[in-house]
Amino acid sequence: MDFTLREHLRRLNERLQLLSREIMESRSLQERNKIEAEIRAANLAIAHYQAALDQENRLSSAGKD
């Protein structure tokens, strides 16, 4: 599971970088709003997966004690 969460985080961070570049190049307000919504969704997903990874790490560490 750890690899899967790390892979999701890596892909989401790559997507976030791409969206950040796209928003700088966008010209219309409608396009910028759409990209900003995607950025917010990516940030929420990153927070979700990071929390799951942190929990997985805590559980793994607790099992070793």
Image (tube, rainbow, N blue to C red):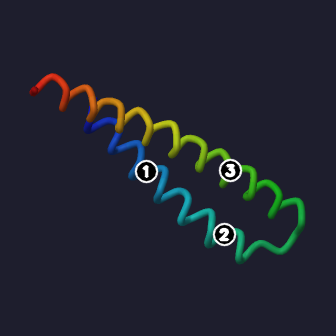
Quadrant housing residue 30: bottom right
Where does the N terminus fall, quadrant-wise?
Answer: top left
Per the model, the C-alpha gap separating discs 2 and 3 is: 14 Å
Farthest residue to the front: give it.
Answer: 65
In the figure, residue 24 lies in which quadrant? bottom right
Kindly state the secondary structure of the residue where label 3 is placed. helix
Left or right side of 2 for 18: right
Q: Secondary structure at mark 2?
A: helix
- In front here: 46 or 28? 46
Q: Residue furthest top?
A: 63
- Secondary structure beneath label 1: helix
> Given the image, on which type of amino acid does mark 3 rest?
Arg
Lower sequence index among marks 2 and 3: 2
In the rendered structure, find residue 60 and report the number of the disc placed on it.
Answer: none
Which mark is drawn over residue 40? Answer: 3
Task: Give me the residue at 62% from left, 63% from top.
Answer: 19
Q: Which residue does the image show at 77% across and 72% down from the upper left?
A: 26
Q: CA distance from mark 2 to mark 1?
A: 16 Å
Q: Is residue 9 left or right of residue 64?
A: right
Q: Residue at x 32, y 35 (%)?
A: 4
Q: Amino acid at mark 1?
A: Arg
* Residue in view at x 10 percent, y 26 percent: 65
Label 1: which residue?
11
Q: Position of residue 22 (x, y in %)?
A: 66, 69
Q: Which residue is mark 2?
A: 22
